[in-house]
Amino acid sequence: MKQGIHPESYRLVVFQDSASGAKWLSRSCARTSSTTTWEDGNEYPVVTLGISNVSHPFYTGQQTFVDTAGRVDKFQQRLAKTKAAQEAAAERKSKKKRR
């Protein structure tokens, strides 16, 4: 590891997810002015996060697919047209064979 490239101010910090209220203690050099008391009774700086892996829809399994460009609908329409054309061609072919 290179010497002198890492911050000197690593310390224990409490991260708090404001969306879910989850908290965890980790090392960081993030600057903050607020503090909180952790489970061990010690006071640590607290960094408030808007969203984290605890509340993000991707990680919680609540993510919904939003198709803003309508690509899925366009694909479904093309597929339906193709199937209709294939069925019509098969029907014409079967009529020719009957003659």
Image: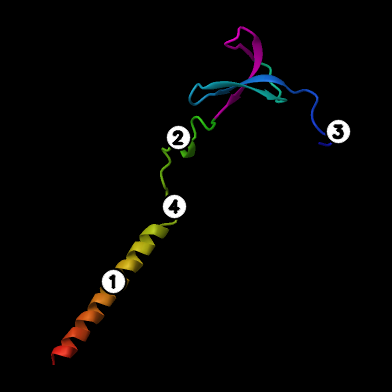
Sequence order check, earlier mark of 1 and 2: 2
Q: Which mark is residue 60?
A: 2
Residue that mark 4 sits on: 68
The secondary structure type at the circle numbered 3 is loop
Viewer-closest of 88 and 67: 88
Inspect the image, locate mark 3, and give the three-letter code of the amino acid beneath it.
Answer: Gln
Which residue of the protein is positioned furthest toward the bottom in this rendering? 99
Residue 3 in the image: state x and y as whole percent: 86, 33
Comparing marks 3 and 4, which lies closer to the viewer? 3
Sequence order check, earlier mark of 3 and 2: 3
Inspect the image, locate mark 1, and give the three-letter code of the amino acid beneath it.
Answer: Lys
Question: Seen in the image, is 71 located left or right of residue 21?
Answer: left
Q: Quadrant of the N terminus?
A: top right
Q: Which secondary structure dominates the residues rendered in magenta?
A: strand
Question: How far is disc 3 from disc 4 in space, using C-alphas?
Answer: 48 Å
The secondary structure type at the circle numbered 4 is loop
Viewer-closest of 59 and 67: 59
Residue 1 in the magenta stretch? The answer is no
